[in-house]
Image (tube, helix red, strand yellow):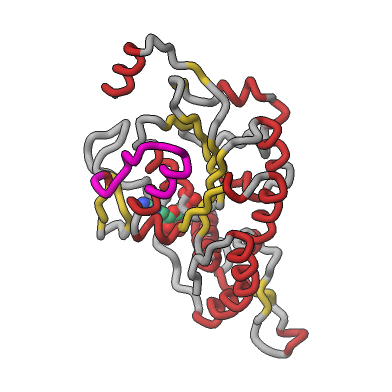
Amino acid sequence: DENYEYRRLKQNQVPVKRLPDALIIGVKKCGTRALLEFLRLHPDVRAAGSEVHFFDKFYHKGFEWYRDKMPPTLEGQITMEKTPSYWVTRSAPRRVYAMNPSVKLLAVVRDPVTRAISDYTQSASKRPSLPRFEDLALVNSSAVWGGAPSVVDASWPPVRLGVYARPLRRWLRRFPRSRLLLISGERLVADPAAEMARVQEFLGLKRVITEKHFYFNSTKGFPCLLKSESRSTPHCLGKTKGRSHPHIDPKTLERLKDFYRPFNERFYQLAGMNFGWP
Ligand code: A3P
């Protein structure tokens, strides 16, 4: 854009590719794409568009490979990428630390019950023959208990990924709490400008992303953008973001809520923040 070209000429700089200064490390289905697209509204942020998967899948390719995946930036601009699977990759904290011990980390978290349904909805959209959510989330323990399925299957990935405390502890063994910003997925929908103010402050950016960038699209049921770097007309995130969820049997929802309650408490303690999930 104009501002960018202007600074480039003024400072006589040529943009170069750099390793990331900040990473969106997770959590899958919590609003990571929305966060990245909102951040890209900022002229001092440049981000890789697609998930790079360096710290989980392609680490063996080395840092030069990784750097080449990044967009060129001017000095002072922040280089970013988002790959939600980093959150649960055991070796990721160590590897990220090896790249840059003062990297800034961002993670979006959301009520794990809704997250699980969102995760399931994504899988079901690719595989229509997938069993019902209720049948996958609960273990059929009728043989043991002589009743309806009642035990949450903690090993089913959509359920397991909502236990945020364990991965958080792993990241905090390597990085100080002040280097990780936890973003509420609910607030990112309810008040994107307020949540983005926290994000910009954390990244040391001028507050450029404000209320003026967003409008609430009531058909979509989500905040959308009035304009962005690539488009000057109003637009929402793609069809794969903000899908409608299937109706879930209330008993299953209760079981899941009970299952997550102690993990959420533990997570709030470690995070030093209460996210207010039911
Ligand atoms: P659903 O599609 O289940 O509603 P991720 O990008 O990490 O995969 O997260 C996808 C989720 O981001 C969506 O899940 C949606 O709830 C949430 N989201 C947050 N802000 C959004 C926005 N402005 N537009 C669309 N989806 C948004």
Residue at the image point whose x is 43% and y is 65% from the top:
245
Tell me: residue 234, above or below residue 146.
above
Q: Could one spot residue 175 in this view of the protein? A: yes
Image quadrant in which you'd find residue 165: bottom right
Residue at the image point whose x is 46% and y is 21% from the top:
75
Percent position (x, y) of residue 224? 30, 49
Tell me: residue 182, above or below residue 234.
below
Tell me: residue 39, above or below residue 152.
above
Q: Is residue 193 left or right of residue 94?
A: left
Residue at the far right in the pictured view: 144
Number of numbered tags placed on the structure image: 0
Percent position (x, y) of residue 37? 40, 41
Residue at the far top in the pictured view: 12
Residue at the image point whose x is 49% and y is 35% from the top:
50
Q: Which of 89 and 274 is in front in this view?
A: 274
Tell me: residue 119, above or below residue 52.
below
19 falls in the magenta region: no
Percent position (x, y) of residue 185? 45, 57
* Span shown in magenta: 197-212
Q: Could one spot residue 29 in this view of the protein? A: no
Percent position (x, y) of residue 76? 45, 25
Q: Is residue 2 left or right of residue 252?
A: left
The quarter of the rendered structure image containing the N terminus is top left
Image quadrant in which you'd find residue 58: top right
Q: In which quarter of the image is ligand 1?
A: bottom left
Q: Which of 181 and 242 is in front in this view?
A: 181
Residue at the image point whose x is 58% and y is 44% from the top:
179
